[in-house]
Image (cartoon, rainbow, N blue to C red):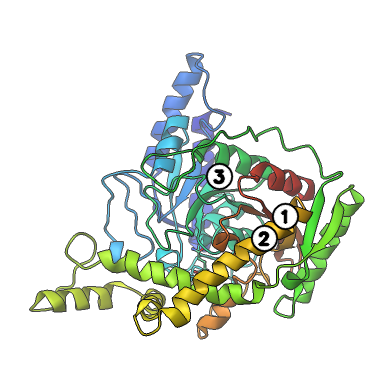
């Protein structure tokens, strides 16, 4: 069908289901129509276009879109319209990808259920009484509900992979440095990566090819030649060495999840993969290290929201100090405040050595353990999340319970590695279970090949 027809059918779909799913914070149907029209005209004129031309996408609302409100699901940025677009958004524009709108998330990408959004709860399309995961829950839910064809998310500690797992879609957290972070609102800059989400591995590969690459506006972006992916992922797993770390199948992981992932590992073995046990002994400390490092960076990154430069400004206060205080007290939600307090605490002179420094030492050790594991295997297989989608409110009273959702994903960000989540079964309630495939830096082709064999 034409790009315009694709866009119209998705706009209809959004109108039909959005009242139940609540994935979008801002819809941009006119923008999508305009792009689609241009694509159709260029195709009619016989122009050769990008494979992404005319394929409708929606974007997590912490990625800046020029002229379109970018809220980070925070009261602080409720009316913020960025004067520039993220590099990834420019790339999509260049490819002729119609943008349907901006998707819900946990405030500033802090959370695992989307319940920390200031604006709305997004429902899991597989069971409307359950969360879609987070923080890219809007992206995963919109895909699962058929409200977009592709989506962009961001992943600091699992925010692409865990919601992909909960909603039964595919999500890739790329190697740190392969996708420009310019225009991604910073949470923890040393861990954040934008990544592609879709309903199939090929879709995700296609989107990743379009957004990766060196960007001089992001000094952490890598300069290198990338190999083609789309249509190149059918090599299969015969002869591949796939590592299975026992630490990811411990008591914190639900039995049904372990069984589904183990069954899938059995299938891969039958397809010719060599399964090797590997050991990642520091995994048990990774969650603590992650919440220390990410909160430390967040406390610094979020200092910019002071009511003076841009964003929300409190009406109350008779001095500059009071203006700062009231703006931040009123503009940030509880979870964001919790992270800022934790971050400033672990960076304070009295506690720096005891917490932040030790977390950074652990980060080095986790990286080394992965490096030795990859001496013995080409990719590592684990569950993506310890559980399946939980009910609204089930974990909100206890932040530690919510943080436990990330036990299988945070190590990947700590080590800067790529990992993909792909559906690998369902639990007894019919809820999707995801398998995570972790690779060496820049080995996206390998992990997507394994994912395609699982799909
Ligand atoms: N759930 C994790 C957190 O709350 C991960 C978030 C993310 O990857 N953005 O920090």
Q: Secondary structure at mark 1?
A: helix
Residue visible at 63% across and 32% down?
228
- For the residue carrying disc 3, how many other residues have a C-alpha within 10 Å: few (<14), some (14-19), or many (20+)? many
**What is the CA distance from the residue labelled 2 to the residue labelled 1?**
6 Å
97, 91: nearer the viewer: 91
Report which quarter residue 66 is drawn in. top left
Task: Decide if residue 339 is in sight here.
Answer: yes
The x, y position of residue 381, in whole percent, is: 75, 59
Instruction: Say if disc 3 is inside 8 Å of ligand 1.
Output: no
Residue at which label 2 appears: 370
Residue at which label 3 appears: 150
Q: Secondary structure at mark 3?
A: strand
Residue visible at 59% across and 62% down?
163
226, 254: nearer the viewer: 226
Report which quarter residue 362 is drawn in. bottom right
397, 145: nearer the viewer: 397
The x, y position of residue 313, in whole percent, is: 19, 68
280, 262: nearer the viewer: 280
Going from the N terminus, do you reach mark 3 or mark 2 first?
Answer: 3
334 to the left or right of 451: left
Residue visible at 57% across and 29% down?
51
Up-down relation of residue 404 to residue 19 (above or below): below
Report which quarter residue 70 is drawn in. bottom left
Going from the N terminus, do you reach mark 3 or mark 1 first?
Answer: 3
The reply to whether dot 2 and dot 1 touch (C-beta < 8 Å) is yes
**What is the CA distance from the residue labelled 3 to the residue labelled 2?**
31 Å
Residue visible at 59% across and 29% down?
1
In the image as oriented, which residue stretches furthest toward the left? 318
Up-down relation of residue 452 to residue 278 (above or below): above
Residue at which label 1 appears: 374
């Amino acid at each position: 069908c034409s790009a315009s027809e694709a866009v119209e059918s998705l706009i209809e779909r959004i109108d039909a289901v959005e009242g139940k799913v609540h994935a979008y914070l801002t819809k941009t149907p006119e923008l999508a129509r305009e792009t689609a029209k241009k694509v159709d005209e260029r195709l009619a004129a016989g122009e050769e276009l990008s494979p992404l031309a005319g394929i409708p996408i929606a974007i997590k609302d912490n990625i800046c879109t020029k002229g379109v409100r970018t809220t980070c699901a925070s009261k602080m940025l409720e009316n913020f319209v960025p004067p520039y677009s993220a590099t990834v958004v420019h790339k999509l524009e260049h490819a002729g990808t119609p943008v349907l709108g901006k998707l819900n998330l946990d405030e500033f990408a802090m959370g695992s259920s989307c319940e920390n959004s200031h604006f709305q709860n997004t429902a899991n399309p597989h069971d409307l009484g359950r969360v879609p995961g987070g923080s890219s829950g809007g992206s995963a839910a919109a895909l699962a509900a058929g409200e977009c064809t592709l989506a962009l998310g961001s992943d600091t500690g699992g925010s692409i992979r865990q919601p992909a797992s909960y909603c039964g879609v595919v999500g890739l957290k790329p190697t740190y440095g392969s996708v420009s972070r310019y225009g991604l609102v910073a949470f923890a800059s040393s861990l954040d990566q934008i990544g592609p989400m879709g309903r199939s591995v090929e879709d995700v590969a296609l989107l990743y090819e379009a957004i990766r690459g060196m960007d001089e506006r992001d000094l952490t972006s890598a300069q290198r030649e990338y190999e083609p992916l789309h249509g190149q992922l059918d090599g299969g797993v015969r002869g591949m060495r796939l590592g299975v770390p026992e630490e990811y199948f411990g008591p914190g992981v639900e039995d049904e999840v372990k069984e589904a992932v183990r069954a899938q590992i059995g299938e891969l073995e039958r397809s010719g993969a060599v399964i090797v046990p590997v050991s990642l002994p520091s995994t048990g400390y990774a969650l603590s290290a992650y919440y220390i490092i990410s909160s430390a960076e967040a406390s610094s990154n979020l200092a910019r929201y002071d009511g003076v430069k841009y964003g929300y400004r409190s009406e109350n206060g008779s001095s500059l100090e009071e203006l700062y205080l009231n703006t931040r007290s009123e503009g940030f939600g509880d979870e964001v405040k919790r992270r800022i307090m934790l971050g400033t605490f672990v960076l304070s002179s009295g506690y720096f050595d005891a917490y932040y420094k030790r977390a950074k030492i652990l980060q080095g050790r986790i990286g080394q353990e992965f490096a030795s594991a990859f001496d013995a295997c080409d990719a590592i297989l684990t569950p993506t999340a310890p559980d399946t989608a939980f009910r609204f409110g089930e974990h909100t009273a206890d932040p530690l319970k919510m943080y436990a959702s990330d036990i299988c994903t945070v190590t990947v960000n700590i080590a800067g590695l790529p990992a993909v989540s792909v559906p690998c079964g369902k639990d007894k309630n019919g809820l999707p279970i995801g398998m995570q495939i972790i690779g060496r830096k820049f080995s996206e082709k390998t992990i997507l090949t394994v994912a395609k064999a699982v799909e």
